[in-house]
Image (tube, helix red, strand yellow):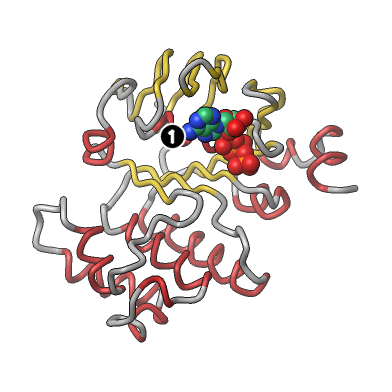
Amino acid sequence: MSALLELRDVHAGYGQTRVLHGIDLVVDPGGVTALLGANGAGKTTTLRAVCGMVRTSGDISLAGEPIQGRPTEDIARRGVAHVPDGRGTFMELTVEENFRLGAFVRQDKEVHADFERMFGYFPRLKQRWRQQAGTLSGGEQQMLAIARALLLRPRLLLLDEPSFGLAPLIVQDIFGILRQVRAEQGVGILIVEQNANLALDFADRAYLLETGRIVVSGPAHEIREDEQVRRSYLGY
Ligand code: ATP
């Protein structure tokens, strides 16, 4: 089975600052890969490297096709949707307008059916259809950001800290929906998450990043038993 996403010896940085020093990473088709690590390790930069938002070298391929060095719009059109940290919804626009923007690159006529599908996952967004995104609760904004990304019909969803700043019950809700989305849409997911417990429960593969290098990798259930991961990220 060839990988949905594969990074080989990927380096990235900002100006003179080198952040990633040769990362190898895989997301299987329809699989979930978690990227763990301390603040500043380079997790967000890894997601940015995949969607062409930061200068990189090395090989990045999507379903066997090289995407490294391509423009962000082109990578999005090939099926990569990014939910950045801080959510990335258009705060001034309504829920409806955010939905329409999410779907605007789509040429097909099934957009409305997909709106309905999103309401199935996120009924609260239907109730808040005409409300400005900036006035939604944090959990609703995260839901909107995920819905908007899914409206691209991605093959790969990049999630940056979806639990950040949210109450535990909302986090449970969101991860429940992500499990459903994964099962129903077959979308592969690369997730950056501070809550290592949550991430390792959700993922089938995981990587631990330290100052721009992968130091531990493997099946999520094995990473959970790793001494270093347990001590530093799981707290037992
Ligand atoms: P966190 O969990 O705190 O978000 P992270 O693992 O996602 O951390 P990154 O956001 O990828 O880490 O940042 C890695 C390093 O790159 C940090 O030292 C950060 O200061 C630096 N960095 C991030 N964005 C920029 C930028 N636009 N310009 C310069 N340096 C940056």
Residue at position x 44%, y 25% from top? 6
Can you tell me whether the CB of the residue at mark 1 lies under 8 Å from the nearest atom of ligand 1?
yes
Number of other residues with Cα within 10 Å of mark 1, as a class: few under 14, some 14 to 19, many 20 or more: many
Asked if residue 149 is positioned above or below residue 144 in the image, the reply reads above
Check the image and report above or below for 45 versus 202.
above
- Which quarter of the figure is the N terminus placed in? top left
Count of numbered circles on the image:
1
Residue 15: x percent and y percent?
A: 46, 19
Kind of residue at badge 1? Arg
The quarter of the displayed image where residue 192 is located: top right
On screen, 180 above or below 204? below
Taking the image as shown, residue 13 lies to the left or right of residue 115, namely right
Quadrant observed for ligand 1 in the rendered image = top right
Q: Determine the secondary structure under disc 1.
A: helix
Whether residue 205 can be seen here: no
Residue in the picture at 33% in, 44% down: 155
Name the residue beneath numbered marker 1: 48
Percent position of residue 153, x then y: 27, 52
Please give left or right for residue 178 compared with residue 167 in the image.
left
Residue 131, percent from left and from top: 33, 81
